[in-house]
Image (cartoon, rainbow, N blue to C red):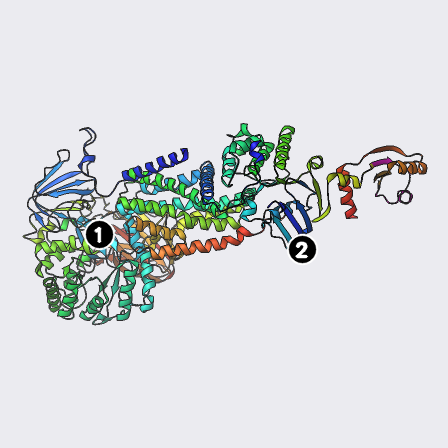
Amino acid sequence: MSTLPAVAIQGLGVHYGSVKALDGVSLTLEAGKLLALLGPNGAGKTTLLAAMLGLVRPNQGSLSLFGQRPGSLAARSQTGVMLQNSGVPELLSVAELVELFASYHLDPMTPDQAMAQAGIKALSRRRFGTLSGGQKQQVLFALAIVGRPRLLLLDEPSNGMDLHARARLWQTVQTMRDAGTAVLLTTHYIEEADRLADEVVLLDRGRVLACDAPAHIRSRLSGSEIRFSTRLDQVALSKLLAGTDFELSGGRCRLLSPQPERLLARLLQADPDLVELEVRPASLEDALSALTLEQAA
Amino acid sequence: MNSLTDTLPRPTFQASSRRLVRALAFETLAEWRNLARMPAFSVPTLLFPVGFYSMFAIVLPFANTPEAAATLLVNFTIFGVFGPGLFAFGVGLASDRDQGWLRLKQAAPLPVMVMMLARTLGAMVFALAVVVALFTVAATLGGVRLERSAWALLALVGVLAVIPASALGLAFGAWLNARAAMAIVNIAYLGSAVLSGLWFPLQMMPASVQSIAPAMPPYHLAELGRQAAGLEGGGLVYPVLWLVFATIIAVAVAMPGLRRPEGKS
Amino acid sequence: MKPLFIVAVLCTALVLGWLLLPVPESSGPANVHTGNATTAAPANDFTLRADRVFTGNEWLEPGLVEVREARISRVGNDFEPDPMLPLVELGDRTLLPGLIDAHVHVWGSALVDALNFGVTTVLDQANDAASIATLRHSGMGAQLFSSGPPATAPGGHGTQYGYTPPPVSGPEDAVGFARTIHRLGSHWMKIIIERGMGNWQVPSLDRDSVAALVVAAEEVGLMPVAHVSELEAAHWAMAAGAHGLVHIFADKPVDQPLLELMAAEDRFVIPTLVVLESIAGTAAVDTDDDERVTPWLSGEQRNSLAQRWPGPRNPVLRQRVIANTRAMHEAGIAILAGSDAPNPGTAHGLSLHHELAVLVEAGLSPSAALAAATALPARFFGLNDRGLLEPGRRADLLVVDGNPRKDISATLAIHAIWQGGQPMARIQAAAVTSAEVPAHGRLSAFRPDAAEAGFGFGWAETDDQMAGGNSTVDMQSEGDETLAWIRLHGEIRSGFGWPWAGVMFSPGDTPMAPVDLSAFGTLRFQARGRPAELRILAFSPALGSMPATQTVRIGTDWQAFELDLAGFAGADPAAISGLVFAAGPDLGEFEFDLADVHLD
């Protein structure tokens, strides 16, 4: 059992007509790990989640959850899901919803436990329709965890949550990972991914651009972001900054460099009037956008 | 945190009938609660049949013989019980899909059959409520007198009528978005009721309507209802077969709609 | 456990509610005695005591019948009347179940006319489904059950009455026909086997079609019955399994095999002797001057009664149908009373009483004749809620003076009628209003801007749309101060058998109220228009709904016409309810002007 990965995807392709929503995606998620799925809108994250839920049929490649076909009852019974924009019957109370989802599972938490884990015990009698956006996310989280899943699929889980609720969410996720639950997360909060993920998968236009630990991705571009205003033109800069990927617009230049000190020395030599110089360490976001741009070029 | 530490190891999925029954019970309860708390659903489905029945049978002098009174009760019972199944599936399923609730349910470890069955049962409970309301009015104000077995059989027909109604609703809900479903299911509901002769006797309708009527499910349900109430013979075989066939067709039409890929994004 | 408890409570409540639902039998005295003494029994609950009670099966002399909630609750000759209920002492009278006429064709005032003569239920043997539905929903008069459209060959007997029954061209049409009439609400199926006689020849269903129709009828749950006029046709129908004949045949004496088959299979016959003897021109019963009858006849009843079949007297026909009926009765075959009203020489309601008398002449005892109009039609046509005085059945009741057990004609001496426990006041023939008719006799006082009348309700457009037709008419006032007229313009369209459109003058204060115009002898008027015939119709209660007609020919120039009022055959000048100036029945557009209408 435990030898089977929670998620195993090999060469997955999903086409909507001529549009390739996913194109040769491969990734693996082991028990107890957290994988962050990142990428711009339209990168294919939602399609990948839908494929994992069995809601979309892949055109090529393979995809299994615990060795089971996605969408099969066996796979679904081990998976907890939190989707974006899930409309829930607004007239049911929080407790009723959690109780309902608990009834789907063989060995669920008690509804009280699940609500406590999600931090919504105080809301249990409220009808879903009366909740704020963040509170609704917390309820959806409770629905995802009530069945004690071995795999959690969280699509933008912290959207709209306040800081306190967000902390609570990640604390619970962490506890579940410790107990062996695999977690797949998509998020816009890249610092969350940086902090929590064992592995980051960067998706763009249906392809995997990078798949590595956050630290490794950052270190690929370990270095700094440099910004300045200069008189030098494109040609001069190209010569000067050969091997880097700089942007120049209106005399303002931005680039990433693993060795900023040397580069700066050369720059100041070439343009002593260089002004508005800023240098700071590159973030994961920088690293990712660099990767994305690299791919686009 | 104990609840979290013991998540592994544990048995993989096994088809536990006990779990399914439990899930069915909660799902039915949730369906019923959701329907009952939705005034846009519960008010028309409960009040329309009772209101129209009261108008035709009590305010207006159409129930001038015991047979006419019983026929009116049968007609409006069928009218009343055809709504919950049709709307729970036709409009309910479409809006569940539009809202994303259906997607979340499909991702949950709940067999689709249980979900459909629960929705049907929820609608049946509602149909039973309609039957209780109509019978109360009919027995007190409407002067309807039926054999004890006839009351029970008519109620049974009323509850079972939810099955073809649900199948028909499923066909609408599987293919339509919520807004279109609301309009089209309403038209189908009222239209089929009128065309089946539930509101006015078919004999008073143009020949074209009379010839369309046998293509309407409520027409055959009303026939069963009249037989249940002891108003006529004619045999169960033909209407029951017709309804079973129509149910199968409707489900067959619905299936590709349920499986169709959802929008992009 | 809590949800289980709630479910259990709800289920118990449902079962209890079910047990509380009302059932047809009035549930015994216990229910009525709750409440205090001042809650008097409802008006429809009462006890009747009469020297003679015929229950449909047997005589109680004396007998008591208790009615609660529109149903009979107790019948006997010795029970103690409930002191809470009014006790009606009928004395030397006879209490019968409301009569059932097993063979009629209803339209117009048929149901009211029938009830007026104690016939509380009529069985219509062939009619248009739409008319039946409308009449059933009127809730007026006798209760109506019907075969709906009959099964007959294309162009056969039954197709001449202005509606088209679903065609039966051969055995292959039988199932479709049965389903169609079942859907249309037919209560049984009438199968017509009729080749006509003498100059009247029509296509008939063949034997295979008859057999297929019988099977199809049984399949959809309708009882098949057959119209026959010949012995051979009766054999076909009985061999196929039809449950009964709706006429006795007259071509030959009945033969032994038919008698044995019908007796063994418990088949019935509705001889309709009154209509057959009317065809034979030999009606034996005459109540034209009977004080028990004449005040209660409506115009339609008088009209159909006064009509005669064409052809010579045929006493042999009468003897044969009576002999055949007698033979069937003696063979033990059930005889049901039916009049076939409103055929010429018969009238709704009244003719059933005549039929009883002829049945007695054919050898039935008065009790058997009464059962033929009560218990037997109820039994054979599945009307298990009526036809007998027994607990649980409808309180359809008839009380007559005298003793019909000795003299069957006593049924005409009607004392009281109840339908479903409701007392029915008998309706007297419409009284002629003594509305003031001015001596000048001017019907028209037309002005250029208004169709004013000299008296009465006045002038109004009329067309056949009220009878289901499609003709149209529009009335305009024309002219100047010196001469004013009305212009009628419209179109005669098909849709009704005798299409008309035009203008009607109602002499009474309300439309169709009869007025005495016997002080006048001549109708004068001026007319012009598109050259055509103009029909002048006179309505009179004596004629029923069929007017008397005179015709003039108009041209493009004004022309004066005068018509003798006596020329309106059958119309009583002492009771004229309307005069109509109408175009038609030729189809197409019409236009005519009418001026200076007056009586001399």
Q: Is residue C109 visible?
A: no
The residue range painted magenta reads A225-245
Q: Is residue C303 visible?
A: yes
In this orientation, which residue lies closer to the viewer: B115 or B17? B17
Q: Are marks 2 and 1 in contact (CB under 8 Å)?
A: no
Helix, strand, or loop for circle 1?
loop
Above or below, A15 against A171 in this view is below
Let me know if residue A237 is in the magenta part: yes
Residue at 40% in and 41% down: B125
In this orientation, which residue lies closer to the viewer: C78 or A5? A5
Point out residue A92 in the picture as x, y percentages from the top left corner: 50, 35
Residue at 19% in and 36% down: C43
Q: Quadrant of residue A197?
A: top right
Query: In the image, is C378 to the left or to the right of B224?
Result: left
Disc 2 designates what residue?
Answer: A18
Q: Amino acid at mark 2?
A: Ser
* Mark in the foreground, 2 or 1: 2
Point out residue B250 in the picture as x, y percentages from the top left corner: 46, 54
Letter of the chain that mark 2 sits on in the rendering: A
Letter of the chain that mark 1 sits on in the rendering: C
Q: How many marks?
A: 2
Query: In the image, is A266 to the left or to the right of C434?
Result: right
Residue at 35% in and 39% down: B132
Q: Amino acid at mark 1?
A: Leu
Residue at 30% in and 58% down: C128
In this orientation, which residue lies closer to the viewer: C499 or A287? A287
Q: Quadrant of residue A284?
A: top right
Let me know if residue C511 is in the magenta part: no
Q: CA distance from mark 2 to mark 1?
A: 72 Å
Kindly identify which numbered label has been placed on residue C383. Answer: 1
Helix, strand, or loop for circle 2?
loop
